[in-house]
Image: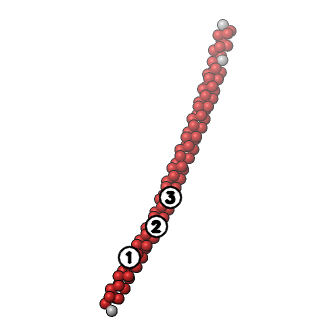
Amino acid sequence: NGEADKFIALRLKRIKNNVVIIWKEYTRKRNFVRFVLIGGEVRSQTGAYSLYFDHWRRVTLETQCRLLLQRVARGYIARCRRRFIRRLRAKATLIQSNTR
């Protein structure tokens, strides 16, 4: 009976020990989940920054290409206009020389 009385007397201590073990396990799991969530948040932010950088790079390259194409187009239009004006002057000179 001494063993049974001792077992009953230590019941609260066993319950406290179990609570401490359960609490330690809970805090370990909670810390692990927090670590995983923080890691996921960092990865998602890094992914978002990567997407923002890709978007910025695409917009910048499109702008540069647009400016280059505009410059090329203006040069082409200017050369065509120069040829047209030269031909127009040549024709005007020819008409004037024929009428004199």
Q: Position of residue 4 (x, y in %)?
A: 65, 10
- Element carrying mark 3: helix
Q: Which residue is mark 2?
A: 72
Density class for disc 1 (Cα within 10 Å; few <14, some 14-19, many ≥20) is: few
Examine the image and state in which quarter residue 41 appears. top right
Which residue is at 67% across, 13% downward?
Answer: 6
Q: Which residue is mark 3?
A: 61
Q: Position of residue 19 (x, y in %)?
A: 61, 25
Reply above or below: 87 against 34: below
Reply above or below: 21 against 50: above
Density class for disc 3 (Cα within 10 Å; few <14, some 14-19, many ≥20) is: few
Outermost residue toward the bottom in this view: 100
Q: Which residue is mark 1?
A: 84
Q: Position of residue 88 (x, y in %)?
A: 36, 80
Lower sequence index among marks 1 and 2? 2
Contact (CB < 8 A) between labels 3 and 2? Answer: no
Lower sequence index among marks 3 and 2? 3
* Front-most of residues 56 and 1: 56
* Residue type, mark 1 in image: Phe
Which residue is at 62% across, 23% downward?
Answer: 18
* Residue type, mark 2 in image: Val
